[in-house]
Amino acid sequence: MIDNLSRRTFLEGTAAVAVGGAAVASALAADEVMAWAAGEGDAAAASGTVRQAPSLCNGCSSKCGLVGTTVDGKLWTVEGAKDHPYSKGTICGRGHGVVQMAYNDERLTQPLKRAEDGTFAPISWDDACREIAEKVNAIIAESGPEALCLIHDPRPSGKYYGPRFLNALGSANVYTHGAACNASKESGITYAVGASNFSVDFGKAKMVMFIGRSYGDAIRPSSVQSLASAADAAKRIVVVDPRLSNSAIFATDWVPIKPGTDIALLMAMANVLIEEDLYDHDFVENYSIGFPEFAAQAVACTPEWAEEICEVPADTIRELAQAMAKAAPAAAVEPSWRAAFGCSYANSFDTARAVCAVNALLGSWGQEGGALLTSSPKAGDIDKTRFPSVPKPQAKRVGDAEYPLVLSGMGSNLAALQAALDGTMRGFFFYNSNAAQGYANPKVWREGLGKADLVVTIDVQMSETAVLSHYVLPECTYIERMELPEFIGGKKHYVGLRTPIIDRVHPDTRSCDEIFTQLAQACGVGEYFDFTLEELAAAQLESVGTTLEEVRTAGTVELADPGFAYGVPKFKTESGKFEFSNAKVGEAGLNPVIGYVPRLVEAQGDELYLIAGKQGIHSHTMTQNIASMNAISREYDLERLWMAAADAEARGIADGDLVEMTSSEATGQVRVRVTERMRPGVVFMPSHYGGTSPYQTRACGFGLNTMDFVPFRMEPGVGSAMSQEVAVTVRKVEA
Ligand SMILES: Nc1nc2c(c(=O)[nH]1)N[C@H]1C(S)=C(S)[C@@H](COP(=O)(O)OP(=O)(O)OC[C@H]3O[C@@H](n4cnc5c(=O)[nH]c(N)nc54)[C@H](O)[C@@H]3O)O[C@H]1N2
Ligand SMILES: Nc1nc2c(c(=O)[nH]1)N[C@H]1C(S)=C(S)[C@@H](COP(=O)(O)OP(=O)(O)OC[C@H]3O[C@@H](n4cnc5c(=O)[nH]c(N)nc54)[C@H](O)[C@@H]3O)O[C@H]1N2
Ligand code: SF4
Ligand SMILES: [Mo]
C-alpha cells in the first residue's frame, strides 16, 4: 500500500493534481494524471462533468482560500483562491496533501462506542447521542455543569457551535489548543499593546528580526511570498534560532541562540537602545507608560550579561541593536508563533512582552515598515428571536483563577486536564483536536481522561484522543461540508466560506453543525439550535453588508475598507498607551514590569536541550497517517532527530545511526540526522511523528512524539504547556 503511493504521486498532486489516494486513483487513468500535471491538459480535456466550488483549506489555522475542481463528482484538483489574502492563488504542500483525507482508507465512517475491553463497535447516531445525553445530565445533576468541558481547535462552524453547546449546558469551560500553541505569546502581546497579535510591514521594512518563527517550514503562502520579496529587496533579515531553519535561504544573519533564552537577547538589545540613547523619545514620552521602571530593570541587562545566558556574543547583540535603531522606525522584531515563545518556556509570556518593548523603543508601532496593529471584522448584530442568546454560565471557567493572564478566548486546557486528574472535571468533548497526543504529556492525558466519566471525540480519523474516548463521532471532511463564514482581518477585511466540493463519501458522517445540534437536542437544550446553518450564515453575512449567494459564488469577498492608516495606533490597553508595566500582571504574581525571567530547566552533564518544530509537508499530528505524506516522510527519513555534528562526534554517533533518547518522562529510539545546521547542545525533533493509534497503521510507531518527553507543568500566569522545558540524554544504540 505505502510503496504504491510514491513521492512522485504526491508531487504530481502538489503540482496540480489533487487526488485521494487509492480510492480516487482508479477514477483517473495514470496518463491523464501525467498530462494534467505537465500542464498539457485542462479540466475540460478530461471526460466527464467538471464542477468547481470554493472552500477553505483545513490543513492549519490559516484556512487559506481554495477552489476545488471535481470531475464526475470526484476530486480532481485544488488550487489557491487568487483573491484570498492568505493563499493569494497558492496553497502549500499540506493543502494538497490534507485534502486526501476525504478518501483515506482509515477514515472514521460511523459513530463508535468503546466497550469495557477497549475495543470499539458501531453505534447509531440516535443511540450515541441519547447515551451521551444521559451521562451529561447525570454529571450535571451530581457535580454541576462546571464538571463538563470542550477542548477544540476551532474551525469556522466549530467556533460558534461548540461554545454555544457547552454554554447552553451551563458550562463556561471552553478551551482552545492555545496552551500548546500561542497562548503565552498572544497573552503577553495583549498586556503590552492591547491586541493579541501584530504583523510586520514587510514591504517597507528595512530590517526584520525573527525569533524562532520559520516561514520556510511553518508555512503560510502569503508569509513566504512577503519574506521572499523582502529578501529580493536585499533587506536585512535576521533569524534567531538554535537551528538553521529553511527560512535561512531568505536571511542575511543566523544567530544560533541557546533555546529559551531569547528574552535575555531582547532585554540586552533594550539595554543598548537605552544606554546609547538610540530609542524613540517621542514614542516613549507620549505613547507609553512604565518606561522609567523598565529602564531601571534593563540597566543590568548588558550585552555581556546576556552573552552568559543566551550564548550570543555581546558584540553581536550590540551590533543588532544599533542596526535596528539605524533602520528604525522601518524595523521590527517579528511576533513569532509557537516554538520560541508561543507556549514553550517558563518565560514565554515575558518574552512576548519583551519583543513588544524592543519595537516600542524603536518607535516602530504603526509606522511604515514597522510593527502594525490591524483590525478584524466580525459578524454584526443578528436577529435574537431567530438566534437566541445563551444565558451566561454561572461558574467561571476552570483554570481562570489560577491562570488569570491567559487570553479569554483561549483558556488553559491543561487546567481542565489537571481538574480531571483531581477528579472534578468529569465530562470532556473534543472537537477537531488531538489533545491527548499534542497538548501535554500523553501519559498524563491517558491518566486524566481515564478518570473521566464521559469522553466524546468528534474527529475524521481515529486519533490518539479518539482512542481514549467513550464515544467517537465521525465528522465529514471539510471538502464535504459547508461551514459558517470565516472573517479575515488585516489592512483590509475579507470574509471566506467553505462550501462542499464533493458529496459525502461516507453517508453516515455528519458536519459540525449537525452534530452539535443533535447533541443539544438530546441533552434538552435544542431551543438554542432551532435554525439551519444556511440561515445563520446568511444572517451573519448580511450583517456585514454581503450575502450568502455572493460569498458562495466568489469564495472570498472583500468587506468595507476598515481605513487602515500609518501612525501610532490607539493602543487598546487600559491606559490607552503602550504598557512597559501592567498592574494586572503584577497581581497575577509575575513581574509587572517587562524584564528578564530565566528558563526553568537547565541541561546538566551531557544532557541536550530538546526543541521541536514543523516540517513543510505536515500539520501537527493530523497528516501523519495520510498515505502519500507518510510515504514522503519515510522516503526522506524525515522523522530523524537533528543533532549537531560536534555533539554526534562526542557520542560516537554517525548520520543515520539509531539512538536512544531519554528524559525524566520517557525513553525512545529514533535515527539521527547529523548536521552542521544545529547549534551544539540542542537536538531538534520534527513534531509530526510518534503516533500510537493502532487504527492509523501508517503513522503508528513511526518516529517519536516530543510531547512524550516533556514533563506535565504549566507556565505561571497563563497555564501554557512549557513544551520545551526539557533536557534529554542521547546515546547510540549498539547494533
Ligand atoms: N508546515 C507546517 N506549517 C504550519 C503548521 C504545521 O503544523 N505545519 N502549523 C501552523 C501553526 S498552528 C503554528 S502555531 C505555526 C508555528 O510556527 P513557528 O513557530 O514558526 O513554527 P515552529 O516550527 O514551531 O518553530 C519555528 C522555529 O523555532 C525554532 N526554535 C525552537 N525553540 C526556539 C527557541 O527557544 N528560540 C528560538 N529563537 N527559536 C526556537 C525552531 O528551531 C524552528 O525552526 O505554524 C503554522 N504553520
Ligand atoms: N505532537 C505534537 N503536538 C503539538 C503540535 C505538533 O506539531 N506535534 N503542534 C502544537 C500546535 S502549534 C498546535 S496549534 C496544536 C494543534 O493541535 P490540534 O488542533 O489538536 O492539531 P492536530 O494534532 O493535527 O489534531 C487535529 C485533529 O483534528 C482532526 N481533524 C482533521 N480534520 C477534521 C475535521 O474536519 N473535523 C474534525 N472534527 N476533526 C478533524 C484530526 O484528525 C486530528 O485528530 O498542537 C500542538 N501540539
Ligand atoms: S498554510 Fe497550507 S495547510 Fe495551512 S491553510 Fe494554507 S494551504 Fe492549508
Ligand atoms: Mo499552532
Image: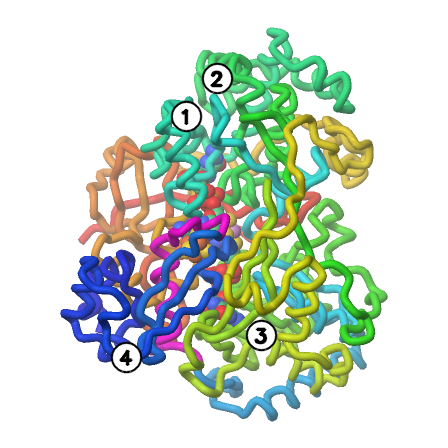
* Dot 3 beta carbon under 8 Å from ligand 2: yes
Distance between mark 2 and mark 1 Cα atoms:
10 Å
Please give the name of the residue rendered at 40% of the width and 56% of the height, measured from the top-left corner.
80
Task: Name the one closer to the observer, 626 or 514.
Answer: 514
Secondary structure found at label 2? helix
Considering only order in the chain, which callout, 3 or 2, is on the residue closer to the N terminus? 2
Secondary structure found at label 4? loop
Q: Is residue 727 above or below residue 552?
A: above
Query: What type is the residue that disc 1 sits on?
Result: Val
Query: Percent from the top left, x then y, of residue 37?
Result: 21, 60
Q: Is residue 639 left or right of residue 127?
A: left
Distance between mark 1 and mark 4 Cα atoms:
55 Å
Please give the name of the residue rendered at 23% of the width and 60% of the height, measured from the top-left corner.
12
- Give the magenta-colored segment's residue range: 84-108
Confirm or deny contact between disc 2 and disc 1 (CB under 8 A): yes
| Quadrant assignment, res 263 | top right
Instruction: Please name which of the two marks, 1 or 3, marks the residue nearer to the observer.
Output: 3
Q: Which residue is mark 2?
A: 320
Please give the name of the residue rendered at 29% of the width and 57% of the height, measured from the top-left corner.
14
Query: Any mark on residue 255, and which?
Result: 1
Q: Which residue is mark 4?
A: 48
Secondary structure found at label 1? strand
Query: What type is the residue that disc 2 sits on?
Result: Leu
Q: Which residue is mark 3?
A: 512
Considering only order in the chain, which callout, 4 or 1, is on the residue closer to the N terminus? 4
